[in-house]
Image (tube, grey):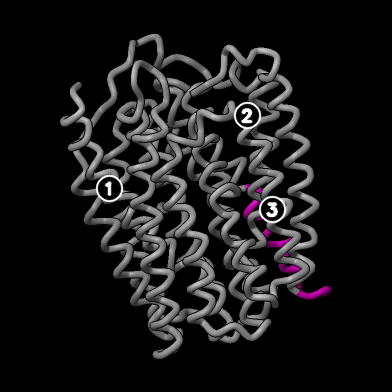
Amino acid sequence: MNALVRRRQLLPFAAVSASYFAHIGFFNPYLPLWLKELGYGLLAISVLTSLQAATRLFAPYGWGWLSDHTGERVKLLRYGATVALLCATFLWLEPGPVGLGVILLVMFTHTSSMMPMSEAAMAHLVSQGGAFDAKRYGRVRLFGSLGFLITVFMAGAWFEHFSMRDFPAWTVLTLLAVTLSVWLLPDLKETVPNHDVKRQVGPVLRQQQVQWFFIAAFFHVLSHMGVYVFFSLFLDSLGYSKTWIGLLWAVSVVVEIFWFYTQSKWMPKLPLTGWLLACSLAMLLRMGLTAQWAHVLWVLLIAQALHALTFAAHHTACIALLSHHFPGRLRGRGQALYTVVAYGFPGVIGGLLGGLLSDRLGLQSVYWASMGTALLASVASYKVWRMQHPANSNRLN
């Protein structure tokens, strides 16, 4: 397949990434603030926001298993986006905590697996000779960061001037964009040898390096939950306006875009396992700065700039390692396992324990706890790196 054909095939995936993360860019930062305006307390907010992570405990692997065995990743994406859009229309009803929980649960069940399936469908298009192409992947993924950047900034300004009552409308409009983009995807079906369909994930998961990789990813993303779930509330409690909250989120996305665009220059400088370690150490620093000096704007800006490492570089390294360990028809289940282990369990645990911590000790305590989990992530990442280090000649690039 020549480069021009590959580029044309990747453009619709860039549109999916842009629209999906445009939805996430306003939904995740401002959902807690919308729930707060509806009158919910910190514990209720943490439970409702944790539903997204709860669906990642079962939905991604279920969808991944189905997509691996049918090869119909695009059709499943279309179904999921359409159902999520229909669910979003019920947010206008403000149905109370139980009804809202049901709506969010069904909606998240259909959105939480969209990026794993999309990236599994795209993975073979961003590889050359079986090797993961960080440059091509980064150029597609940066469209997602641009989508996030636009909506996190625009939504912050909008909600500052018009209040949070328009949150359901923003949800419907952004999910409409997601639905339209997935229906424009080419109906690709990856061709693999028949024996590859029968391959099981068990033997892969029994490899020590894979086990430590998942442990490192779990603790790394658990540290991030302090940002994903509580960052907007923390800034709000410190007196930052919604516009500044949006700007501070935007800073992290700007450096993320820079990384994705230029990562082909930086990624070869370390083995992928080395990047896991560097990113976890950066997370330790980021959480410490946020915990101690979030009230100092310039320090908080530095902490947010570390997102280039704590998310962007870490995410690329993880996707590349997954592509290596889970090739072919294992790819969907590998991506799904990563979503379950690195986002599902950390999201539920981080959301619920963070809610309890913040309710009893204040929101700042969440970031001190995140330093502890970042330290554990660093230890596990070091273990993965040491397993790879004696065989530097076999680095993944």
Numbered badge on residue 357: none
Spatial CA span between label 3 and label 2: 19 Å
- The residue type indicated by label 1 comes to Arg
**Residue receiving disc 2:** 273
Which residue appears at 37% of the width and 73% of the height?
Answer: 90
Badge 1: residue crowd in 10 Å (few <14, some 14–19, many ≥20): some
- The residue type indicated by label 2 comes to Thr
**Residue receiving disc 1:** 78
- Quadrant of the image containing the N terminus: top left
Task: Please state which of the two labelled residues, at mark 3 or mark 2, is closer to the viewer.
Answer: 2
Which residue appears at 58% of the width and 68% of the height?
Answer: 48
Magenta part of the protein: which range?
345-362
Picture quadrant where residue 25 is located: bottom left
Q: Nearer the viewer, residue 220 or 170?
A: 220
**Residue receiving disc 3:** 223
Q: Nearer the viewer, residue 233 or 8?
A: 8
Is residue 64 visible to us here?
yes
Picture quadrant where residue 382 is located: top right
Badge 3: residue crowd in 10 Å (few <14, some 14–19, many ≥20): many
Residue 128 screen position, x and y as percent: 34, 21
- The residue type indicated by label 3 comes to Ser
Residue 307 screen position, x and y as percent: 57, 54
Say which element carries label 3: helix
Which residue appears at 72% of the width and 68% of the height?
Answer: 355
> Magenta span has 282?
no
Is residue 357 visible to us here?
no
Is there a contact, CB below 8 Å, between mark 3 and mark 2?
Answer: no
Badge 1 or badge 2: first in the primary sequence: 1
Residue 220 screen position, x and y as percent: 67, 46
